[in-house]
Amino acid sequence: MSDQYAVIGNPIGHTKSPLIHRLFAEATGQDLVYAAIEGRPGRFADDVEAFRAAGGRGMNVTAPFKLDAFAFATDRSPRARLAGAANALKFDGERVLAENFDGVGLTRDVVRNLGIGLRGRRVLLLGAGGAARGALLPFLEQGPAELVVANRAPEKAAALADEVRTHGPVRGCGYADLDGQRFDLVFNATSASLRGELPPVPATVFAPGALAYELAYGKGQTPFLRLAQQNGVQRLADGVGMLVEQAAEAFDWWRGVRPETAAVIGQLTVALR
Ligand code: ATR
């Protein structure tokens, strides 16, 4: 029987992960099947145990279960620990290993695929939830001049920044504090786009030549990307590359072979303008 993997989330209907992993498996000749599981609220452990008992080897974990997955694991990678959340699990006998590839996937997409370095640049991260948390350390490892985390509740941004202060120049603030400041890379890691909302970011934050990156994917031109475009930003990206890169990291972790990502990203890309 083929090795079994799955993504678990709720809702899960629109997930692209089964398609991505099927394309990876075909391209690398790996014998595996990959399903989508709608996890039940409050029953995460039961649902994972059932999949494992049926022969599951590993899982991707998406909203709202990333904290449950972290708690469920017996072994947590440093990346998962610093994010406080897991987006991938690997079953190894009785052990359940937790990883978090969201931040490395995002950073790899920006630096390698888009060819935009963070070193010495001013970087703005909007939001202080799970998505923002995962990006902090991989960003700081790139050596930015400054990383600013902005959030509606500024104390959450300040607390996040405090946690990683020893890793580089980072500070948290509210949106109003961004008046008069400009950034070379601006990432929307809020969940605002999922509801078609715009985070209250001043339109003046985009430096000449800036990148505007929406972590959500497949939504076309979100309010955040529209704001960026209306204010002269030409480098626009959504999270499709991040999605495919984190999937490739998980695939490599499970199977020991890293698939090529460019063709898969190309296949899933939708127009942003
Ligand atoms: P995720 O795991 O997707 O990051 P989360 O942990 O619920 O989800 O965090 C959601 C983030 O989006 C938070 O930073 C939230 O800001 P607050 O902490 O101030 O609530 C942010 N967010 C959600 N809707 C937003 C909006 N319309 N404008 C700005 N920020 C928003």
Image (cartoon, rainbow, N blue to C red):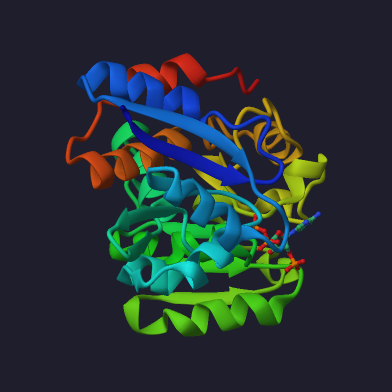
Q: Is residue 188 positioned above or below 169 on the image?
A: above
Which residue extends farthest left? 256
Considering only vertical position in the picture, is 32 above or below 48?
A: above
Give percent across and percent down for residue 40: 70, 52
User: How many labels were placed on the picture?
Assistant: 0
Q: Residue 8's quadrant in the figure?
A: top right
Q: Quadrant of the C terminus?
A: top right
Relative image position of residue 174 (x, y in whole percent): 71, 72
Looking at the picture, tell me which residue is in the foreground, 37 or 165. Answer: 37
Residue 239 vs residue 176: left or right?
left
On screen, 159 above or below 181?
below
In the image, 136 versus 250, the foreground residue is 250
Instruction: Tell me the residue at 46%/75% (across/down).
Output: 170
Residue 21 relative to residue 70: left or right: left
- Along the horizontal axis of the image, is 93 left or right of 184? left
| Residue at 23%, 25% in the rendered image | 30
State the residue at coordinates (35%, 52%). 104
Q: Is residue 240 visible?
A: no
Which is more toward the observer, 118 or 81? 81
Q: Where does the N terminus fall, quadrant-wise?
A: top left
Q: Report ligand 1 position as a quadrant.
A: bottom right
Residue at 38% in and 56% down: 121
- Residue sitting nearer the eye, 238 or 248: 248
Q: Is residue 76 visible?
A: yes
Picture coordinates of residue 28, whole percent (x, y): 21, 22
Quarter of the view holding residue 194: top right
Horizontal side, residue 245 vs residue 45: left or right: left
Image spot of residue 232 (x, y percent): 62, 33
